[in-house]
Image (cartoon, rainbow, N blue to C red):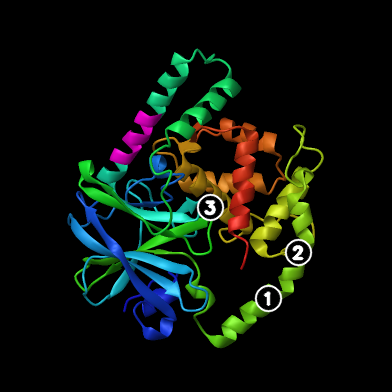
Amino acid sequence: MEQATDLPLWLEDLGDPDLEVNVETQGTIRLPTGAITACDPLSFLDSARCFARQVEPGEYPIEVGKLEEGGQVAYALIRFSDALIESWDVGLVADRDRPRLGFPSYPADTGVGCFVDGQVAKALIERGQDHFDAGAKWIADRGVDTEDDDAWQEAFEAYEKEHPPPLSDVSAGDVVGVDDADGELVTFATGRGAGTYSSFWALDGTGAPVCLLTDFGLLDLVEGDDATDEADQSDADATDDDFDDDDDDLDDEDDFDGDSDGEGSGGTGLDALLRLVQGGGAFGDDEPAETEVDSPFVILANDTLNGWETDGTVELEDGASRESFVDAFAEFLASEPTPDKLEDWLFDQDAIAEVYGDSDALWQTLRTQARVARPT
């Protein structure tokens, strides 16, 4: 089987009994257009985009692979054929190039992922908008001051207690029929829970899709060369104490909030972020590493931008060089930023078309992405 060197190595063993997973069929999914979205449907359905590669419209089985020990969902896939898998390809989102580092991925804040046809997703998004519009009318009819954000939010929460939003009762393992869009949304648990997850296409000898698979990052932890695994575990054990020692710091507000003049704790916050990325003691001193393709600053910049683009927080200008922006962002991260500096810097970038979010929200995304990158 042709295998790109940077793809998860365990993909070569899909279907092998030695993979130590129990495969279960979890219903079928109707794809009326063949354009597929993978996302957290409870948080990010409205901002998710379809994969560039499409399949023939039709009805296909969903399979999940659960670890024999522990039972966590290690992967979920849509099977299009029983042909022999000859190669794998990255699941690129339409109209977006593959990042220089890592893979395109989606955030799963709720621990739930899904597959859904783009037409079905659009119908569900429209239901959500109808729900919001009805709620706004319900609030207006009660004379709530629309300029009072707190009062409006409180009223909307009261409305939703009486009128639950679409998908509010959906959980992992559900098949949600959307008959007016001729399809379903199928959900599953995302490995150990919240995180960012990538998808891959399995292809036959003609290049036709055999399956579309989302990897939840569990199988590379149990597969591979024993010596390598033992060495990796030794490294992980060596850094466990570092993480334990740092946990109090990471929960300390001072470590992640800096003042606007750049003095105070901004550098400390970034150091904590980088300890999460690198596993502690990455640099051996307090000097930031030079910005290189494989530096933690570039990795963190790239992955944070992925998250912002996925959830609609940041939009790049049409034609802007994503690679150049990531390099500039990495250099900025190496300069010991603060939350306020981060917001100001983003608004000063010509490559940025829109920023939706204040300094605290932007900084929290950076912190969350570093936690996602924390070694297991």
Position of residue 261 measured from the top left corner of the image (x, y, whole percent): 77, 32
Q: Is residue 8 left or right of residue 79?
A: right
Amino acid type of the residue tagged 2 in the rendering: Asp
The residue at which mark 3 appears reads as 303
- Residue count near mark 2 (Cα–Cα under 10 Å), binned few <14, some 14–19, many ≥20: few
Q: Is residue 293 left or right of residue 9?
A: right
- Residue count near mark 3 (Cα–Cα under 10 Å), binned few <14, some 14–19, many ≥20: many
Q: CA distance from mark 3 to mark 1?
A: 23 Å
Amino acid type of the residue tagged 1 in the rendering: Asp
Q: CA distance from mark 2 to mark 3?
A: 24 Å
Secondary structure found at label 1: helix
- Out of 162 and 289, give the one closest to the viewer: 162
Secondary structure found at label 2: helix
Position of residue 277 measured from the top left corner of the image (x, y, whole percent): 64, 60
> Where does the magenta region start and end?
123-131
Amino acid type of the residue tagged 3 in the rendering: Asp
CB contact under 8 Å: marks 1 and 2 = no
Q: Quadrant of residue 243?
A: bottom right
Determine the residue positioned at 33% across, 46% down.
95
Give the mark, 2 or 3, whose residue is nearer the N terminus.
Answer: 2
The chief SS type of the magenta part is: helix
State the quadrant of the C terminus: bottom right
The residue at which mark 1 appears reads as 235
CB contact under 8 Å: marks 3 and 1 = no
Give the mark, 1 or 2, whose residue is nearer the N terminus.
Answer: 1
Position of residue 204 measured from the top left corner of the image (x, y, whole percent): 23, 72
Q: CA distance from mark 1 to mark 2?
A: 15 Å
Give the mark, 3 or 1, whose residue is nearer the N terminus.
Answer: 1
Labels 2, 3: front one: 2
Q: Is residue 371 left or right of residue 286?
A: left
The residue at which mark 2 appears reads as 244
